[in-house]
Image (spheres, grey):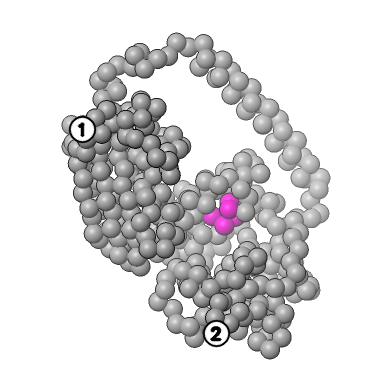
Amino acid sequence: MYIILKLSTLESLQMIYTFNNYQIDPINFSIKYNNEVVAVEPRVFDLIIYIIENKSQVVSREELFDKVWNTRNVSDATLSNHIKIARTVLGDDAQTQQVIKTIHGRGYQFVAEIKLLPANPNSNDKSRSNKTRKIFSYIALLIIIALLTVIIVQTPFSKQSIDEAHHNKSIAVLAFLDMSPLKNHEYFSDGISEEILNKLAQIPELRVISRTSSFYFKGKSTTPKSIGEQLNVAYILEGSVRKYKDKLRITVQLIDSETSIHLWSETYDKTMDNVLQIQDEIAHVVSEKLKLSILPQSKTTKVNSVAYTLFLQARHLTQSGTLKDLIKSELTVKKSIALDPSYAPSWHLLGFIVFRATHGYAL
C-alpha cells in the first residue's frame, strides 16, 4: 500500500494525461472517466503510468518487471493479469487494443493519442501571482550571485595560499562505475558514491570535495594526477559497483593523486542487506589510512533493500532538474517510504523535492 501525501506545490505544476475522456493524475494517483473517479490498484496504476511515459517505444516485459515491480521474480501470468486489468480500467480490451497494444515477442505500447493538461487550469490568477514572486526571487538571487562573484574575483587566491597540511587532508570521491551486466544501475553506483562522500564529510579535519565537482569527471579519461591538480586534493577515492538481483559487489581504491599510487584497495561481495554496513566500513578505512579521526561507531541502520534502491533512484532523478523527473522522483520516494517508513533519508528527500517545487527550481 502506498503512502499518498498531498503536495499542493507539485499539484500546481503537475500535468494530467488525457485521452478518450479519461484523465490520469500521476501526483494524486487518480484516474477519472467523464470526471468520475475510476478505482484502480496501486500496481496497476504504476503500470499504466510507466507505459504512458514511454509511449514512444515498446516496453518489454523484463523492463516492466524491473521498473514497476523492482524485481525479476514476477511471473508472466501476473504481468498479463495486470495488463488485462489496466485495459479494463482504460476502457480497452485484448481484442481491440486501442489503448494498450501487445507487440508479440516484444512487449507493450500505449497507442492512444495523449494530451497534456495542467492540473489546475482555473488558477491563472494564482499562477501569475506565483510567477511574479518567483521573478523577484530570481532577481534577488542574481544580485547575491553577482556580489559573491565580485568578492571571489577580488580576493587573492592561489594553490600556494592553502596550507600544506590542509591540502594533505583532502579527498575527492569520484562517481563509481556501473559494472552491472546491463549497465542499467547508474543511479545505484552514483548513489553509493554519494553516500560514502557524505559519510567522509562528517570527519571534521577532512576536506571533501563536493559531489558536483567530483562527478564532473564521470565518463572522462582523466588521470588521478590531473584530477588532483584541478580539484586541489591529495587523495582520490574511486570504485565500481556491480549489482545483480540481490547480489552486490563493490570495489574501491584509495589513490594518492600526486603519485597515482594505490594506497588501499578492497572488494566487498555482499547482499543488499549489507549495503549500509559496507559504506560505513569504507569510510572508516579511509579515515584510518589518512590518519584522521575515526568516525564514531554507530549502530548501522537497517533498511529494506527495495526501499533503499527506490530511494537512490528518486535521488538520482532529482539531479536532472526537469519537472518530469522531479515528479517521477516524488512518486518513487513515496514508494520507498511506503515500504520502509522508518528510513529517515527518504523523508528528507521528499522534503527536498517539495522545497524545489516551491521555489520553482525545476522549471
Residue 208: give x, y in percent of width and height.
34, 33
Mark 1 residue crowding within 10 angstroms, few (<14) / some (14–19) / many (20+): some
Residue 205: give x, y in percent of width and height.
27, 28
Mark 2 residue crowding within 10 angstroms, few (<14) / some (14–19) / many (20+): few
Name the mark on residue 290.
1
Q: Which of 85 and 136 is in front in this view?
A: 85
Is 326 magenta? The answer is yes
Q: What stretch is highlighted in magenta?
A: 325-329
Horizontal placement of 104 versus 171: left or right?
Answer: right
Q: Which residue: 69% across, 67% down?
A: 24
* Amino acid, disc 2: Asn
Q: Which of 129 and 211 is in front in this view?
A: 211
Q: Is residue 120 visible?
A: yes
Q: Which residue: 70% across, 73% down?
A: 111
Q: Is residue 44 visible?
A: no
Q: Which residue: 32% across, 34% down?
A: 224
> Chief secondary structure of the magenta span?
helix
* Amino acid, disc 1: Leu
Looking at the image, tell me whether mark 2 or mark 1 is earlier in sequence order: 2
- Label 2, label 1: how many angstroms apart (C-alpha)? 56 Å
Q: In this view, does 288 lie above or below 80?
A: above
Which residue is denoted by mark 2 in the rendering? 81
Horizontal placement of 205 versus 129: left or right?
Answer: left
